[in-house]
Image: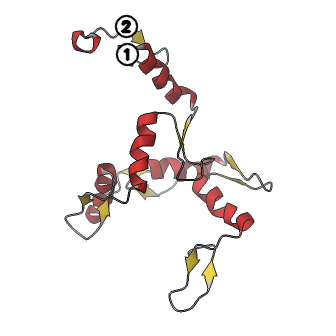
Amino acid sequence: MLTHSGGKRYSCRECDARFTQSDNLRQHMLTHTGQKMYACRECDARFTKFTQFGTLKRHMLTHSGVKKYSCRECDARFTLDDSLKQHLLIHTGEKKYSCTECDARFTQSSTLKRHMLTHSGVKRYSCTECDDRFTQSSTLKQHMLIHTGVKKYSCTECDARFMHRM
């Protein structure tokens, strides 16, 4: 009933968000602390974690194999509607996110944020096996293949296998 009456008596101290239930506020606060309590069981749990259960649930769709969103311009299909929206920018060529440090431009704000780390020198992701550190989690994941010996890429012409695509 509080939802319908507009009685949002729980407010966030960090931003203007307001909630009808204390549980919702507590869940929201995780977005400010960066604490990621929900790990994907399909991915490597050390790297794929989320602050909200709903975001994990949405991520789990990527493992289902169901791709109900299709591009009108090409044969690409996607599990998430947001993925299709981002993909459509490829066809328009629109790169509305610009780096303030160099001339690089991006179709996605998340790609710009990741790029900005290259200018900051901040390397938040560290290898548990050696002293190497990385600006991006994806680079760390790729690096970890060195320690595991997993060669997930194979040549289309012969039986050779590789750790890296190129």
The structure residue drawn at horizontal position 42% and vertical position 51%, both measured from the top left corner, is: 98
- Identify residue type, mark 2: Arg
Is disc 2 surrounded by few (<14), some (14 to 19) or many (20+) residues within 10 Å?
few
The structure residue drawn at horizontal position 80% and vertical position 56%, both measured from the top left corner, is: 130
Task: Write down the residue under mark 1.
Answer: 18
Helix, strand or loop under label 1 = strand
Whole-percent x and y of residue 5? Answer: 23, 9
Whole-percent x and y of residue 120? Answer: 63, 46
Task: Please report contact status of discs 2 and 1: CB closer than 8 Å, yes or no.
Answer: yes
| Front-most of residues 166 and 123 | 166
- Identify residue type, mark 1: Arg
The mark nearer the N terminus, 2 or 1, is 2
Q: CA distance from mark 2 to mark 1?
A: 7 Å
**Is residue 101 something one can see in this rendering?**
no
The structure residue drawn at horizontal position 29% and vertical position 8%, both measured from the top left corner, is: 7
Whole-percent x and y of residue 8? Answer: 33, 11
Is disc 1 surrounded by few (<14), some (14 to 19) or many (20+) residues within 10 Å?
some
Task: Write down the residue under mark 2.
Answer: 9
